[in-house]
Image (cartoon, helix red, strand yellow):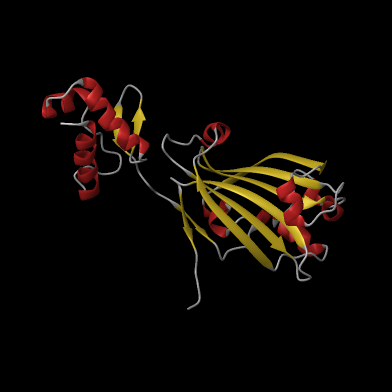
Amino acid sequence: MTAASIAADLRAAIRSGTYHPGDRLPSEAALMSTYGVARMTARHGLAMLKDEGLTVTRHGSGVFVRAFEPMVRDSGAHTAPDGVPAAETPGAGLTVQTMTVASDVAPDDAVRAALRLADGETVTVRERRHLRGRKPLLLATSYVPTSIAAGTPIAEEDAGIGGTHARLAEIGHAPVRFREEVVGRMPTIEEVRAMYIEPGTPVLAVTRTAFDAAGTAVEVSEITLDAGEFVVRYDFEA
């Protein structure tokens, strides 16, 4: 009996409902007895499920089936405060922490290109973290050209009711069109620490550019979602 076979049996039991979210899986000792294998084989079989994101380890308690209770990120909800879709706003169960706000920052090449900035032009940067209870689910960093943000609440810690998009609308740059690029990848060490991401869990990295009615790019947002906590929904016309 191999570790892969043990993992396959446990995986099938999870999918069939023999083990439900939150249930404790058999211990290494129990698997050793059931399958007649060495401890390292049993341990490796359990580790394979953890790497797949199916289980979580609670030190001193054992290995448990992971509960998946996702937030729904609706791609059509572009007008919520700070440009974050409605499913991600405090009213939908998340709270928002503004981590940093910085003005006159030199953007990297990708942000500069997306905002179509000339050499030497700078941006205002807003970094936020979104939490459900005490668990961070989402990191968001937005970039607005300094030429637009300067002298407005966008450059302040509290952007006010409605967030960045409401302030952009007040100065004639209301976002009316959005472009999103989504990439699935494994998290960086910094993202694991910032969002308490479980081992084996990828993230969804979303880059969203907002355009006003004149076609000017007025904001670029880099959003990192814990893929173990979100379902991303897209609607299309036939």
User: Is 158 drawn above or below residue 61 in the view shown?
Assistant: below
Q: Which of the image's four quarters has the N terminus?
A: top left
Q: Is residue 206 left or right of residue 197?
A: right
**Can the viewer see residue 161 in this picture?**
no
Q: Is residue 8 left or right of residue 137?
A: left
User: Is 179 drawn above or below residue 153 in the view shown?
Assistant: below
> Which of the 4 image quarters holds residue 7?
top left
**The residue positioned farthest toward the bottom in the image shown:** 238
- Residue sitting nearer the eye, 149 or 185: 185
**Can the viewer see residue 113 in this picture?**
yes
Instruction: From the top left corner, tell me how far across and down residue 214 is, in percent.
Output: 79, 70
- Residue sitting nearer the eye, 166 or 225: 225
User: Is 15 drawn above or below residue 7 in the view shown?
Assistant: below
Instruction: From the top left corner, tell me how far across and down residue 224 is, in percent.
Output: 57, 46
Q: Residue at x 26, y 38 (%)?
A: 23
User: For the image shown, how many numbered marks are present on the structure?
Assistant: 0
Q: Is residue 125 left or right of residue 221?
A: right
Instruction: From the top left corner, tell me how far across and down residue 25 is, in percent.
Output: 24, 34
Q: Residue at x 70, y 68 (%)?
A: 176
User: Is 217 drawn above or below residue 60 in the view shown?
Assistant: below
